Structures are given as C-alpha cells and as structure tokens.
Image: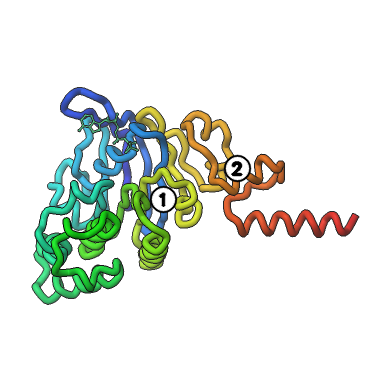
Amino acid sequence: MSYLTLNDVTYRYPNGYKAVDGVSMSFEKGESVAIIGQNGAGKTTTVKLMNGLLKPEKGDVFIDGWNTKDYTTAQISKKVGYVFQNPDDQIFHNDVYSEIAFGPKNQKLPPEAVKENVMKAAERTGLTPVLEENPYNLPYSLRKFVTIASVLAMDTDVIILDEPTAGQDPAALDRLASIIQSLIGEKKLVMTITHDMEFVVNHFERVIVMADRRKIADKSKREVFWDFGILEQSMLKQPHISRLSHSLQLQAPILTIDDMIQCLQQKKRAQEKV
Ligand SMILES: Nc1ncnc2c1ncn2[C@@H]1O[C@H](COP(=O)(O)OP(=O)(O)OP(=O)(O)O)[C@@H](O)[C@H]1O
C-alpha cells in the first residue's frame, strides 16, 4: 500500500454541501505534488481529509497503514503536517517560539528535543531574530513562515502547504523554494495547493487537477500543462512561458525558460544545417 491513499473519498460539510466526490489518489514519500484547480474545486477539503482535520463521509483515507477514521487529528498530525492557507487561522500563541514549540510539545518530545526542533525550524524559515515577538506584530509574509516553521518543527513525513506563495516577496519566495527543495531531498512527501503555475513548474513534478469536487487529472506537470482539454475543463492557464511558446507555435512542450532556450537553440542548429 502507498504511504498515503485516498480511496473513493466523499466529504460533505455539516451544512450538507458536498465538497469532495469520489476522489482517489495515492502518494509515496519523496514525491512533490501540486494540487491545482479553480476556487471551490475541493482542493483544501481534500488535503484536510489527508491530515485528519476532516473524516470522509464515504471511502477511506490511509496514512502509513492507519485509517484516519480510527485515529484522532492529534495522532495523525504526527505524520501529516498541514500549513493553513491563512496564517491567522493557525496562529494562537503570543510569541513565535511558543507557536513553533506547540507541535513538538504535543508530540511529547523531551524539552531538549523540542528546543532543538524549534531552533532548526526557525533557522530554516529565517525567524531566529523574532522568536520572542508576538506573531501578530509581524508582517503577513513572516506570519506565513511562522506557520511553516510550526509544521517543520514536527518533522512529519508529509508536509502540505496551502497557497504558500500568496503575499510573498521575491526573497521570501527564494526561501520557500529552498525549504521545499531540502524537504524533497529529505524524502518527505511535499504537497502544495496553489494558483501560482510558475511555482508549480519550478518546484513540483506531479500535478493533480481538481474541478467541481473531483480529480480530473493526475500526471506529470508537462503532461498537464500541455493537455488543452484538461486546462479548458478546469479553467486553468498554462504557465506564462508555455503560453508564449504556444503562441509562437514552437511545437514543443515548454515549461521553463531553460526549455525555451534549448528549443530555440535546436531550431537554430536545424536551420543552419539546411
Ligand atoms: N466549512 C464549510 N462549510 C460549508 N461549505 C464549505 C466549508 N468549507 C468549504 N466549503 C465549500 O466547499 C467547497 C470546496 O471548498 P475548498 O476550500 O475545498 O475548495 P478549494 O478548491 O480549496 O478552493 P480555494 O482555491 O478557494 O481554496 C467550496 O464551495 C466551499 O465554499
């Protein structure tokens, strides 16, 4: 069995609204996966089912052999860390250190290990100088890193980042990129929900597309971003460079500037031969 599996999962909110309908997907540690789709497609609901914040109405979610129905959210959060879309939905301590320490303390780690995890997470997220600050005195961008640090400090096998690039400046985006790359290097399963297609092509390999509560595609980023049927159905756009290469009729599944350079060089060499 895969490390994380959703098996024909349906979820309905208490008001009766069905937000996820018959969704199946499975993941291994070491994968990098982006879940994309229009607002309301069911992405956030799907990942909340992965970390036990929500339990399926139908179907099953398995994490490392556990059926989430049989475990509490606190137990599951030792394996799956979820960084909320809005940091203000997650932060509830009066200082950054306590906020980051909450998870490892809950995991009943000894005090020295709690401190070590907090300091390491703070270092990775650039928060070491503000550990004593009230998170609500920090700008939005740093509050987002407080929530990321809180999840990193739990050292979970799965890390899910919900809209991590929203409101971030270029320096913060670089920091985020290096955190993601190092997590993938540590063989964590790293997942994101995002509307930022450039972020997807730069850091994630597998792309799951959701539309109208269902999964409509699950393949490599190159296959997804050059499948016009899927893009139309999900009302998504290609990354900028792919759109440019498409309008220039370059006839190559370009995703990055490097792809574009390579393609143009090949065309130039072919012309020189003629
Ligand atoms: N607590 C709730 N009660 C009732 N309906 C909800 C609740 N939370 C979300 N929904 C609805 O469920 C649907 C799916 O929401 P979800 O947040 O999973 O979508 P999403 O694809 O993540 O969208 P976004 O990109 O806007 O975050 C939406 O129509 C939303 O309004």
Three-letter code for the amino acid on which mark 1 is drawn: Val
Mark 1 lies on a secondary structure that is strand
Q: Name the residue: 59% across, 41% down.
A: 226
Left or right: residue 264 compared with residue 271:
left
Q: Which residue is mark 2?
A: 243
Residue 272 sits above or below residue 239 on the image: below
Residue at the right extreme, as displayed: 274
Instruction: Please say which color scheme the image uses.
Output: rainbow
Three-letter code for the amino acid on which mark 2 is drawn: Arg
Q: Image quadrant of residue 176?
A: bottom left
Residue at the top extreme, as displayed: 16
| Quadrant location, the C terminus | bottom right
Can residue 125 be seen by looking at this rendering?
A: yes
Q: Name the residue: 66% across, 46% down.
A: 245
Please tell me the numbered disc located at residue 33.
1
Q: Name the residue: 32% across, 52% down.
A: 161
**Which of the two marks, 1 or 2, is nearer to us in this view?**
2
Q: Position of residue 187 (x, y in %)?
A: 37, 64
Q: How many marks?
A: 2
Query: Few, some or many C-alpha atoms within 10 Å of disc 1 (few <14, some 14-19, many ≥20)?
Result: many
